[in-house]
């Protein structure tokens, strides 16, 4: 544990990122597809002499500017804040590898925003041809932002052997281009570009739905139909790119998906499949709604219809991004960094010297581990995916298990054997036997309110049958009382104090 | 109708000659659905129907693997944890069941407050009540079939309700249970009820219900009736209303798929009659009202008196609810119309309050 833990009660930090990210994606992908939409539509209008379109397009570009420039940028920064808090180790890894890419991203981003503003403010003030060029330039730079971020995003699932060979040596940047143009890069770029184009269509449908069908029926029909067409490429090509993408997903990660087809195995990790199904379902609905309501009845296409499409797109996006994120579990960077910030390569060392040995937040400071240590273990190694009472609640998942059964699970997590069912979605639990025992006690008290099985002294060879008050739990109570000055990340003494008192009765 | 000699038109022509499709389409186009600010409620019968169709479809798929009797639990375990997409079918079936009862309730109250039960639609009202009762029985009988812990104890509690009926009560309970205790026999009986008897009753009754809708057309709420004929708007049933109906079905399908995927129906541990019942055992939400009323009266008047009074007051409510078309038969019955509205509000409030109350007083899950 090198960083403080960001403990978001009930929903967990991961879900905070997810919520911000889904809104951001819905807007940022529109910023990209929308650039192309504005440019192409303007070109078409100029070539075919549709002056009435240009007027609508000018208003559309204002809506576009406000939405992408304000909300897109805000949520983008929001993602940065939240990933930095939730997963500092992972964020740091990405920054160290992709300094150059990110610097480039921000330059392009600035240019993109300036062009968007220029595009809107120069309507009718400069020659048509020049204005059209600004539009195309905007479309190009916005696509470039996707191109760059796509390399970083796909890297996490498929970093590639060249980069992994250098990982941890400090020379990772030498494999920059291999890491950037990784296996997932092209299929993912295809998928995202298609999503951008569809979202451009959907947002435009929302916008143009407000044209009055009585006074401007003809323009409305034309523009709604034109926008609806933008969904077509996605429906034709999506399956192809999706299959390609799946092909690039490393086998062990793909297993999650097949697992989810046959089971919901309560406690097993099958959300991936279910998320993917939701995306499939909502995407199909978007297709039907667009065809029947927008293409066949463009005049009657209402704002409500548009908003429902947008809502469906929101769910589809959430499902798709959720699938992508979960496919990568239990890693942040596949084969290198686990979701709970442990590096694969550090596991043996941490098992030998202790998970908290070098941590500034080590409550036992060289003494025998205590329940407080157990709590730190939980915060450091489990909290990135679980919460105590809410999302993937530890209390619920462990419900009905006594101390011994909890010990068995922890042992399985620790051993992380190749055939362990947990291996597919949980990282190994690292630490010395004494630390793991401390975690076991903490979880036992958390779930059952008190210790429900004998204390195991990990330094003894055989597991004693009798309860040894003398060993681990005893200092647990002392420390819990006097250790209030310990550098706690968050004051959790409220939740553990009564529990710790309970354990005194044993 | 199409007059080119492309293949689809040829097929259509062939079928039309034999089945008279054009007439049917013309008939459907003839029927008109009123359009006004309460039109939204016209969709709820259709939504209920949609969920019923989903139930039939997924039910048949479940039949392929479900085995009643001793192996019931094992077979559901297999469906949930082993068979490809078995969990999806089971989740969809269970969620659709709940959504169907819920939308039937919405449909019932909306037709009630729009006063669609009035002359000449009394039989629509009665057949509707029959359908709702059958739907609830579907739910009750289906709930036991997986035979996990929750199903076992909830059914035990549920069967105690008819058991409180004086004289015949215990006999009824024994009959459906197939003995004094819930066992593999009970499953076989519930299974027969669930997949043979109830559908055999439900489907004809549904046909009757729909035929009556067809015969009488949609009712118009009083606020619309007050308007002169020329100001009332309506749209043709086919294709306009049918399209909107389909859009609603699409929404319903999405909601259903979302629920089934995000909250897949889980399976508890196998039922063990020797274990003590969990403290918070309770029936499905749509039986909560009757469960809670019995509990309230039981607390007020201990013993058989309480049981009887609870049952009596519950049944009184149901009977009054059923005969509402008799005491509020026409829109001219001013005073009774207002009373019926108040009665409806009372019933709605009573159901909501007892249900929420019922859940609030359950002991917390440990
Ligand atoms: C449980 C399955 C049921 C199904 C599948 C069903 C189906 C339908 C359908 C499709 C309609 C025409 C559209 C509409 O008015 O919404 C309808 C109308 C009607 N239903 Fe039901 N229904 C069911 C239960 C009920 C219940 C529980 C009641 C009330 C006790 C009820 C009373 C009525 C009435 C009064 C109408 C006529 C509405 C009007 O003319 O405005 N139905 N039903």
Image: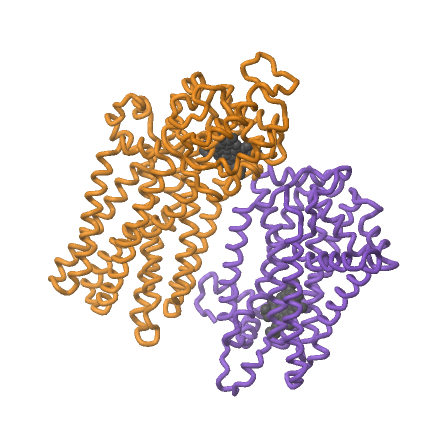
Chain colours: A orange, B purple
Residue A54, compared with residue A450, is above or below; it is: below
Quarter of the C terminus of chain B within the rendering: top right
Q: Residue at x 45, y 41 (%)?
A: A12
Instruction: Please give left or right for residue A126 compared with residue A352 in the image.
Output: left
The residue closer to the viewer here, A239 or B339, is B339
Horizontal side, residue A503 vs residue B234: left or right: right
Quadrant in which residue A344 is drawn: top left
Above or below, A32 against A126 in this view is above
Q: Residue pushed farthest top?
A: A461
Q: Can residue A394 be seen at all in this image of the molecule?
A: yes
> Residue drawn 19% across and 43% down?
A107
Q: Position of residue B190 (x, y in %)?
A: 75, 50
**Which residue is most to the left?**
A127
Q: Quadrant of ligand 1?
A: bottom right
Q: Quadrant of residue B357?
A: bottom right
Residue A270 or A14: which is nearer the viewer?
A14
- Where residue B225 appears, as percent x and y from the top left, is 56, 83
Q: Residue at x 30, y 33 (%)?
A: A94
Residue B232: % across, % down: 50, 82
Q: Is residue A39 left or right of residue A282?
A: left
Residue that sits furthest to the right in the current view? B167
């Amino acid at each position: 544990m090198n960083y403080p833990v960001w403990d978001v009660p009930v929903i967990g930090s991961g879900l905070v990122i997810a919520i911000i990210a889904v809104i951001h994606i819905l807007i940022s992908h529109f910023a990209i597809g929308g650039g192309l939409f504005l440019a192409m539509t303007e070109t078409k209008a100029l070539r075919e002499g549709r002056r009435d379109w240009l007027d609508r397009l000018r208003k559309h570009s204002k809506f576009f500017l406000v939405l992408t420039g304000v909300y897109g940028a805000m949520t983008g920064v929001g993602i940065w804040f939240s990933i930095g808090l939730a997963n500092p180790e992972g964020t740091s890894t990405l920054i160290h590898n992709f300094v150059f890419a990110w610097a480039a991203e921000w330059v392009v981003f600035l240019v993109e925003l300036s062009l968007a503003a220029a595009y809107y403010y120069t309507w009718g003030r400069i020659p048509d041809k020049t204005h059209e060029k600004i539009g195309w330039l905007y479309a190009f730079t916005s696509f470039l932002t996707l191109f760059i971020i796509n390399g970083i995003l796909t890297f996490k699932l498929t970093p590639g052997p060249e980069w992994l060979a250098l990982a941890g040596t400090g020379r990772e940047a030498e494999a920059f281009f291999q890491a950037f143009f990784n296996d997932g890069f092209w299929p993912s770029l295809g998928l995202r570009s298609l999503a951008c184009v569809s979202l451009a269509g959907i947002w435009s449908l929302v916008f143009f739905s407000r044209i009055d069908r009585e006074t401007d029926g003809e323009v409305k029909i034309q523009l709604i139909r034109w926008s609806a067409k933008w969904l077509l490429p996605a429906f034709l090509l999506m399956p192809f790119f999706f299959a390609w993408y799946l092909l690039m997903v490393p086998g062990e990660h793909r297993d999650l998906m097949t697992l989810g087809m046959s089971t919901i195995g309560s406690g097993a990790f099958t959300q991936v499949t279910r998320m993917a199904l939701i995306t499939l379902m909502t995407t199909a609905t978007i297709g039907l709604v667009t065809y029947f309501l927008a293409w066949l009845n463009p005049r009657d296409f209402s704002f409500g219809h548009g908003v429902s499409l947008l809502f469906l797109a929101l769910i589809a996006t959430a499902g798709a991004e959720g699938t992508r994120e979960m496919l990568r579990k239990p890693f942040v960077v596949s084969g290198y960094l686990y979701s709970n910030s442990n590096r694969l390569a550090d596991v043996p060392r941490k098992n030998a010297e202790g998970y908290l040995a070098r941590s500034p937040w080590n409550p036992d400071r060289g003494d025998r581990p205590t329940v407080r240590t157990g709590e730190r273990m939980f915060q450091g190694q489990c909290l990135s995916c679980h919460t105590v009472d809410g999302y993937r609640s530890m209390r619920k998942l462990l419900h009905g298990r006594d101390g011994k059964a909890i010990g068995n699970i922890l042992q399985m997590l620790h051993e992380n054997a190749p055939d362990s069912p947990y291996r597919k979605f949980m990282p190994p639990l690292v630490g010395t036997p004494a630390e793991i025992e401390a975690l076991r006690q903490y979880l036992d008290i958390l779930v059952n309110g008190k210790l429900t099985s004998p204390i195991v002294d990990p330094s003894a060879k055989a597991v004693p049958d009798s309860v040894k008050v003398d060993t681990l739990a005893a200092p647990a109570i002392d420390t819990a009382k006097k250790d209030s000055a310990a550098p706690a990340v968050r004051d959790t003494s409220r939740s553990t104090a009564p529990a710790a008192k309970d354990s005194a009765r044993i | 109708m199409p007059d080119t000699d492309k293949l689809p038109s040829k097929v259509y022509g062939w079928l039309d000659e034999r089945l008279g499709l054009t007439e049917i389409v013309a008939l459907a186009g003839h029927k008109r659905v009123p359009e006004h600010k309460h039109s939204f409620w016209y969709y709820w019968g259709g939504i209920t129907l949609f969920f019923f169709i989903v139930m039939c479809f997924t039910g048949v798929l479940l039949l392929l693997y479900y085995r009643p009797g001793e192996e019931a639990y094992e077979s559901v375990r297999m469906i949930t944890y082993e068979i490809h997409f078995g969990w999806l079918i089971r989740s969809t079936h269970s969620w659709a069941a709940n959504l169907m009862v819920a939308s039937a309730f919405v449909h019932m109250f909306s037709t009630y407050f729009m006063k669609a039960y009035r002359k000449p639609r009394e039989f629509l009202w009665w057949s509707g009540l029959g359908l709702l009762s059958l739907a609830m029985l579907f739910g009750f009988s289906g709930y036991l079939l997986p035979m996990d812990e929750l199903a076992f104890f909830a059914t035990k509690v549920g069967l105690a309700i008819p058991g409180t009926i004086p004289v015949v009560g215990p006999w009824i309970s024994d009959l459906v249970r197939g003995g004094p205790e819930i066992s593999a026999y009970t499953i076989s009986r519930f299974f027969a009820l669930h997949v043979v008897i109830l559908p055999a009753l439900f489907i004809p009754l549904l046909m009757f219900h729909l035929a009556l809708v067809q015969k009488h057309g949609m009712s118009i709420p009083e606020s619309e009736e007050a308007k002169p004929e020329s100001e009332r708007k309506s749209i043709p049933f086919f294709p306009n209303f049918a399209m909107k109906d389909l859009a609603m079905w699409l929404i319903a399908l999405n909601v259903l798929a979302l629920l089934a995927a995000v909250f897949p129906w889980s399976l508890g541990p196998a039922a063990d009659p020797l274990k003590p019942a969990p403290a918070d055992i309770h029936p499905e939400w749509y039986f909560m009202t009757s469960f809670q009323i019995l509990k309230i009266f039981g607390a007020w008047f201990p013993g058989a008196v309480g049981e009887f009074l609870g049952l009596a007051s519950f049944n009184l409510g149901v009977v009054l609810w059923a005969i509402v078309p008799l005491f509020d038969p026409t829109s001219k019955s001013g005073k009774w119309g207002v009373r019926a509205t108040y009665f409806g509000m009372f019933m709605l409030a009573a159901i909501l309050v007892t249900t929420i109350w019922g859940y609030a007083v359950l002991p917390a899950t440990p």
